[in-house]
Image (spheres, rainbow, N blue to C red):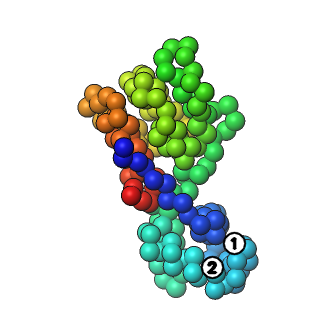
Amino acid sequence: MAECVVYLMKEESLKVLKVMNGVTTKTDLNGFARMVGLSPTETIEQMQELLKSGLVRKAGSGYGITEKGRNALRAFVPVEKGEEFHFYNDIDQPNGFHAGSILSFCEILKIAPVASLEFHLYREDFENWIRGEFEDLILVNELAKIRSDELRGEELRKEILLALGRRYYISET
C-alpha cells in the first residue's frame, strides 16, 4: 500500500519553523536563537536542514519561511475541540476513529476501513471538513477530482494519501 509518510521534523526544526512563522520583525541570530531555545550554532544547523528540504529560503542576509514550510506547519495544527473529523463506516456506524489535525487525519486514513473512506469521500465529508477547518481549496479540489475518478478500495486510499502528501508533507517515501 502506498503511504503518505509524514516528514517527521526534529522537534528543534519544528520550533524554528513555528517561531519563524510568528516573527513579524527582523531579528538577529542571537535573538532568534533565544526565542527558539537553541544556541546560535544549533539554530543555524536547523536552518540549513530546513533550507535543504525547501521549508525555508534565503532572504537577503536571513531566511524566510516558504509556502511549503507554512503547509508543513498546518499539518500539525489541531482543530478546535468538537471540530474533529469522526469516521463512520456507514450512517449510524461510527468506527471509533477521529482526527483533530491534518497529521492525525493522514495517519487514520492509513488504517481506517476502506468502506469508511468510500462512505466519506462520496458524501463529500472529507471535502467539507477540509474546507471548513483548514480553508484549503487546493486539497478540496484534489479530493473532488479523486471522487470524480470513482476510485474504490486500496486505490482510493492510495490516491487520498498521495494528495495529502503533495499538499502537506515533505516526503512520500
Secondary structure at numbered mark 1: helix
Secondary structure at numbered mark 2: helix
Could you tell me the amino acid type at mark 1?
Val
Q: Residues within 10 Å of mark 1 (few under 14, many from 20)?
A: many
The residue to which callout 2 is attached is 43
75 to 118, vertically: above or below: below
For the residue pair 137 and 117, the one nearer the viewer reads as: 117
Which of the 4 image quarters holds residue 25?
bottom right
For the residue pair 169 and 172, the one nearer the viewer reads as: 172
**Comes first in the chain, label 1 or label 2:** 1
17 to 96, vertically: above or below: below
The residue to which callout 1 is attached is 36
Report the side of 152 relative to 13 (left or right): left
65 to 42, vertically: above or below: above
**Residue at image point 49% right, 37% down:** 111
**Residue at image point 63% right, 33% down:** 83
Q: Are marks 1 and 2 in contact (CB under 8 Å)?
A: yes
Report the side of 157 relative to 21 (left or right): left
Question: Is residue 138 at all visible to an observer of this figure?
Answer: no
Q: Residues within 10 Å of mark 2 (few under 14, many from 20)?
A: many
Q: Position of residue 119 (x, y in %)?
A: 43, 22
Image quadrant where one finds the C terminus: bottom left
Q: Position of residue 131 (x, y in %)?
A: 48, 36
Which labelled disc corresponds to residue 50? Answer: none
Image quadrant where one finds the N terminus: top left
| Disc 1/disc 2 C-alpha distance (Å) | 8 Å
Residue pushed farthest front? 1
Residue pushed farthest top? 92
153 to 101, vertically: above or below: above
Residue pushed farthest left? 149
